[in-house]
Amino acid sequence: MTLRAALTLRRSTRAYSDAPLSLQQLSDLLWAACGVNRAGGERTAPYWRHRILLSVFVLQPDGVTVYDPAEHALTPYMKGDFRALAGEQDFVGRAPLELVYVARGEKMADITAIERQLYASVDAAFIGQNVYLFCASAGLATVFRGALDKDGLARALHLPDTDFVTFAQTVGFSDEKPPDSQGKSP
């Protein structure tokens, strides 16, 4: 699929089936999100001041894992279904996957709290857009969200006081009708 075709199909979805992603789909999704794409450890998404500030927490029905881009692997974090805590909308918790973008505050100790929020949010948005484009190209649905109890989710995930949740992104299969678009320019 061309980039133009993926951009044509890119959209936010708020109705999901509970069908799980295959292991290959999950692997490809996480690599597209922020995987290592060059020998020097560079990522598919840019990041602020050449510091990797974010971790991608993967919430699934059977537990929480953290994506390790260097190993392209999921590291077990905790058991339990925390998906419903990743948002305030009614569809959250139904989709098979919630990605939660967690900023590692200790990596930003030299800047103000406002700058930490800003730079971590920008980095999360870069990753989120990669997820959108991957989902569009792979027939998956997604929506990037800030409507969640970030502090409550951070407590549930037992995050250190220096870390904070920036955004969450739902991923799954849509229960909505696909868009009717031919990729025409406005």
Image (cartoon, rainbow, N blue to C red):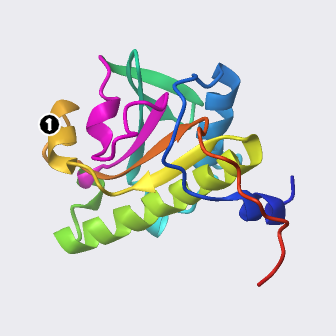
Q: Nearer the viewer, residue 42 or 152?
A: 152
Q: In this view, does 184 lie to the left or right of 11?
A: right
Q: Which of 130 and 45 is in front in this view?
A: 130
Where is residue 37 drawn, in percent x and y? 70, 47
Where is residue 3 drawn, in percent x and y? 80, 62
* Above-or-below relation of 73 to 13: above
Q: Residues within 10 Å of mark 1 (few under 14, many from 20)?
A: few
Where is residue 92 drawn, in percent x and y? 37, 38
Secondary-structure class at tag 1: helix
* Above-or-below relation of 186 to 88: below
Q: Is residue 93 visible?
A: yes
The image quarter containing residue 11 is: bottom right
Residue on which the image places disc 1:
155
* Above-or-below relation of 178 to 174: below
Q: Is residue 112 visible?
A: no
Q: What residue type is labelled 1?
A: Arg
| Membership of 37 in magenta stretch | no
Q: In this view, does 166 lie to the left or right of 29?
A: left
Residue, x 66% and y 40% (percent of image)? 140
Residue, x 64% and y 21% (percent of image)? 23
Q: Which of 174 and 172 is in front in this view?
A: 174
Point out the stretch of residues depicted in magenta.
80-105
| Membership of 88 in magenta stretch | yes
Q: In which quarter of the image is the C terminus?
A: bottom right
* Above-or-below relation of 169 to 21: below
Where is residue 88 drawn, in percent x and y? 27, 46
Residue, x 67% and y 59% (percent of image)? 10
Residue, x 47% and y 42% (percent of image)? 170
